[in-house]
Amino acid sequence: MLSIVATPIGNLGDITLRALETLTTADAVVCEDTRVTGALLHHLKIPKKELVSLTSFTDDAKVEWILKRLEEGENIALVSDAGTPGISDPGYKLISRVRDRNFSVEVIPGPAAFLAALSASGLPINQFFYIGFLPLKKGRKTLLQSLKDEELTIVFYESVHRIEKTLTELAAALIEQPTRPVVIARELTKLHEEVRRTTVADLPEVAKSLTKKGEFVVVLGPVQDRGGSS
Ligand code: SAM
């Protein structure tokens, strides 16, 4: 059985009972960075486990090796460094190959930074568009421009190194929509959690004044706030 296990995005209290049980009983844990997952398991007081690293660069031979172990009846847990595997993280290739072979898969859902940000944003979120990380070069300008007409709430990830540049470019792309709301969520579930609501007009100033530490999610309100029903 392959168990896809979501882990906390900062606050260890967000681990679920099912995640604890699954990680404790797994024969091996497939993860991104064995040091990160090793530290997580240690904090969660889970007995030492075999950790197998799997990144987006992992070759097919290793994926095959994991498939063989599943075929032999082992219980393998898949985690990422934080949050939900496959959400702007590795996991897709393995899960898709396991599905192709019709092996059993279960999911142990839990935190994902974009869902936490949406839910804290106060923007309409009955429908939204998750775009992961913006492209760094090719397609970046076109994507930013396309947000002018987007009728859904948009949510995306950004790194501390690019947050100011990206917010400044977003403000420039949406200059004709000065009142459109933007929410910047930083360090969600952690000690320095911060959720700032602003508008496109004020975004360049806010971008400059942000504490440039930690992890960020940006939520952009729809072109016309149609007001969610809940
Ligand atoms: N799989 C993860 C998930 O389910 O959210 C996302 C992994 S992605 C490689 C990492 C990005 O998620 C960070 O650059 C940041 O944009 C966002 N992120 C992760 N944890 C966060 C947190 N505690 N607060 C704000 N953003 C976070």
Image: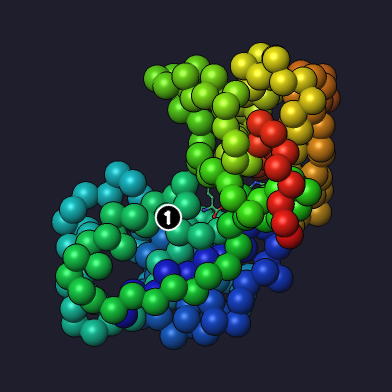
Identity of the residue drawn at 47% across and 81% down: 22
Rendered image coloring scheme: rainbow
72 is higher (above) or lower (below) than 56: below
Q: Residues within 10 Å of mark 1 (few under 14, many from 20)?
A: some
In percent of width and height, residue 121 lies at 75, 47
177 is higher (above) or lower (below) than 131: above
In percent of width and height, residue 47 lies at 51, 81
Residue 153 or 53: which is nearer the viewer? 153
Q: Is mark 1 within 8 Å of ligand 1?
A: yes
Give the quadrant of the C terminus: bottom right
Identity of the residue drawn at 77% across and 20% down: 178
121 is higher (above) or lower (below) than 148: below
Query: Which image quadrant for residue 222?
Result: top right
- Residue 122 in sight here: yes
- Residue 218 in sight here: no
Helix, strand or loop at mark 1: loop
In percent of width and height, residue 108 lies at 49, 74
Three-letter amino acid code at the position of disc 1: Gly
Position of residue 112 in the picture relative to residue 187 (left or right) = left
Identity of the residue drawn at 24% across and 84% down: 73
Query: Which image quadrant for residue 213?
Result: top right
Position of residue 209 in the picture relative to residue 74 (left or right) = right
Give the quadrant of the N terminus: bottom left
| Location of mark 1 (residue) | 86
Identity of the residue drawn at 52% across and 24% down: 146
207 is higher (above) or lower (below) than 66: above
